[in-house]
Amino acid sequence: KKDTGDTRETASAFVCRDLLDERARLEVYDPQVSRDTMLMEMDYTLKVNDTTYPNMLASNLVTSPDPYSCAAGSHGICVLTEWDEFKPLDYKRIYDS
């Protein structure tokens, strides 16, 4: 949700859940939302928690301090936001990492 910290029923949480179901390792960057808030929403809306995904959230759902470290070494990226902050990123730098 553009320019907010509102995570209620955000579509990106559903994408993350589906990728976790496939045992993907996710690295997430959000400029407004803390890891705790993200996990609370995923638990509330999707029942994604340490009980339903044992031994996965700590290792397969990592949060990053910035978009460049988030993308480093990845096999693919998903930009699941309309935030203007993501438009001017150096995508060549991201690709090269």
Image (cartoon, helix red, strand yellow):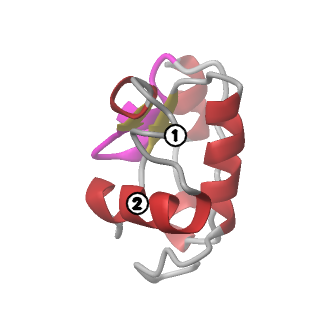
Residue in view at x 50 percent, y 59 percent = 42
Mark 2: few/some/many CA within 10 Å (<14, 14-19, 20+): some
Q: Secondary structure at mark 2?
A: helix
Q: Where's residue 28, x and y in %?
A: 45, 44
Identify the element where label 1 is drawn: loop
Tell me where residue 4 appears, x and y as whole percent. Answer: 45, 83
Q: Please tell me how many numbered marks the rendered image carries.
A: 2
In this view, 86 is above or below 27: below
Q: Is residue 11 above or below residue 23?
A: below
Q: How far across and how far down the image is residue 6, in percent?
A: 46, 81
Residue extent of the magenta highlight: 63-73
Query: At 56% across and 71% down in the image, what residue appears?
Result: 83
Question: How far across and down, in percent of the image, does residue 58 sit?
Answer: 33, 30
Residue drawn 71% across the image and 25% down it: 22
Asked if residue 80 can be seen in this view, the reply is: no
Dot in front, 1 or 2: 1
Q: Quadrant of the N terminus?
A: bottom right
Which residue matches tag 2?
38
Q: 88 and 1: which one is in front?
A: 1
Q: Quadrant of residue 21?
A: top right
Instruction: Name the mark on residue 52.
Output: 1
